[in-house]
Image (spheres, grey):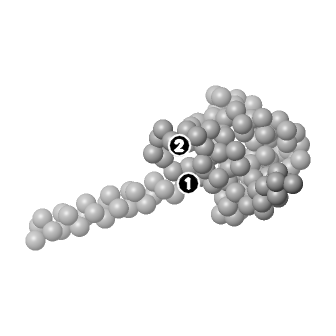
Amino acid sequence: MKTKLISIALFLFFGFQSFTQNEWIVPEKHVYTVNPTLETDFLMLGEELYIKYCQSCHGEEGHGDGKTLEKFDVDVCDFSIAKFQSQPDGVIFYKIKFGRSSMPNHSKKLPDDVDRWLLVNYIRTLTECDTITRYSKSIH
């Protein structure tokens, strides 16, 4: 009986731990941070930053299918899905800046907040509809 209770307690503890590790908790002050740049500000620079810092993991169109994944067994976010795109800009900015687990911290690689905001703006263009539009243009 005692062994059974210990087993259940361990299962609940570790099961809860793995559940909470998948959830990315962003401090409230960052959730409501307003993007100081305009959506269309310097999208080409945002794309250059994406290619340099994000594409290897998140893929050319942000589907989480970058070439680095062939080497590592990690889950990578798909930027094109509605669940990701529904996040406030401040949440995406926070995730880029501070990272977690397999997502690197970019506070030193991208020390300028403006660069991170331009990256947020570019990532916003990687929607499912945009991918379809870009694909259809490439085959014509």
Indicate which label's residue lies in the foreground, 2 or 1: 2
The quadrant in which residue 15 appears is bottom left
Residue drawn at (31%, 60%) of the image: 13
Front-most of 71 and 91? 71
Residue drawn at (55%, 54%) of the image: 25
The quadrant in which residue 66 appears is top right
Q: Earlier in the sequence, mark 2 or mark 1?
A: 1
Residue 103 visible, this angle: yes
Residue at the disc numbered 2:
69
Residue drawn at (48%, 56%) of the image: 22
Q: In this view, does 15 lie above or below 1?
A: above
Label placed on residue 113: none
Residue 140 is situated, as x and y percent measured from the top left of the image, at 87, 54
Residue 97 visible, this angle: no
The quadrant in which residue 119 appears is top right
**Quarter occupied by the N terminus:** bottom left
Front-most of 117 and 25? 117
